[in-house]
Image (cartoon, rainbow, N blue to C red):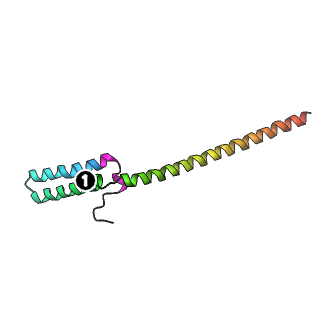
Amino acid sequence: MKLFEVQIEFFVPLWRRVALVAFCFGWSLVEFSRGMVFWGAIFVALGAYSMWQLFFDGWPAKHAVDDQVKNDRVVSEQVMADRSIELNGASAASTTNNDKVSNDKTNHV
């Protein structure tokens, strides 16, 4: 794990990545306007690093595709399992109803 790990799941939504970079650069302007050059430079460096990691390093596109495929696979497996349960339940119920109808017919003959 890196000291400043920003390529985490929390930053997958675009607005969070933009907010982080804007905050860093915005805060650097506050520090520069107050004459704090050292802290302004620190926040410019943090903003530049965050921008590189979150927008230009190929993240989250390379990881999001893998995660989306995994999520789609899990969801489709759950849907198929639910449908098979519904179908098995419906066929069992229809079989039970058919048996009752056939038994009623044979009893009346």
* Foreground pick, 41 / 35: 41
To which residue does mark 1 refer? Answer: 51
Query: Closest to the observer: 85 or 66?
Result: 66
Q: Where is residue 107 in the image (x, y as percent from the top left)?
A: 90, 36
Picture quadrant where residue 41 is located: bottom left
- In which quadrant will I find the N terminus? bottom left
Residue appearing at x 47%, y 51% in the figure: 69
**Is 78 one of the magenta-colored residues?**
no
Marks counted in the figure total 1
Position above or below: 96 against 28: above
The answer to which image quadrant residue 52 occupies is bottom left
Q: Is residue 39 left or right of residue 51?
A: left
Q: What element carries label 1?
A: helix
Side of 81 where 61 appears, left or right: left
Amino acid type at image mark 1: Met
Give the left or right position of residue 45, taking residue 32 as reference.
right
Identified at 81% across, 36% down, the residue is 101
Span shown in magenta: 1-16
How dense is the environment of label 1, judged by Cα within 10 Å: few (below 14), some, or many (20 and up)?
some
Q: Nearer the viewer, residue 74 or 52?
A: 52
The residue furthest right is: 109
Instruction: Measuring from the top left, give residue 38's x and y in whole percent.
Output: 11, 60
Magenta stretch, overall SS: loop
Q: Which residue is drawn at 38% across and 54% down?
A: 62
Q: What residue is shown at x 12% (from left), y 53% (from top)? A: 31
Q: Where is residue 28 drawn, in percent x and y?
A: 15, 53
